[in-house]
Image: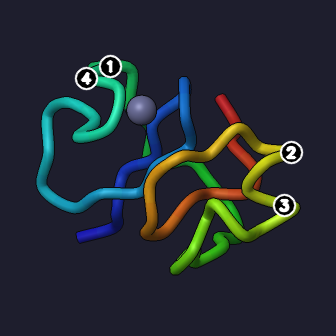
Amino acid sequence: MKEKACRSCHKLSEDVKECPICKSTDLTTFWSGFVLFVNPEKSEIAKKMGIVGSGKYALRLSR
Ligand SMILES: [Zn+2]
């Protein structure tokens, strides 16, 4: 099963009905590309994307 991306924070998770980070239920399987953050507090990209937790995040979301 394809992971779902949260439309609010872009977090990717499998088998979830809500985002484990921001608790949003607005999830989509229509995403492309992802980044894996191990130390988001040290990453410039994570800062730009507003990411606070480690893990996989979708780069692009589509409708
Ligand atoms: Zn989220």
Vertically, is 32 above or below 49?
A: below
Residue at left offset 73%, top offset 56% = 46
Q: How crowded is mark 1: few (under 14 residues within 10 Å), some or many (20 or more)?
A: some
Residue visible at 77% across and 68% down in the picture: 43
Neighbor class of circle 3 (other Cα within 10 Å; few <14, some 14-19, many 20+) is few
Q: Position of residue 62 (x, y in %)?
A: 70, 37
How far is mark 2 from mark 3, CA to CA? 5 Å
Q: Mark 4 points at which residue?
A: 23
Residue 5 lies, in percent from the top left, at 46, 46
The numbered mark, 2 or 1, whose residue comes first in the sequence reads 1
Q: Which amino acid does label 4 sit on?
A: Lys
Instruction: Read off the residue under disc 2.
Output: 48
Q: Distance between the residues labelled 1 and 4?
A: 4 Å
| Ligand 1 falls in quadrant | top left
SS at badge 3: helix
Residue 61, quarter of picture: top right
Q: On the image, which quarter does residue 42 sit in?
A: bottom right
Q: How far apart are marks 4 and 2 (CA)?
A: 21 Å
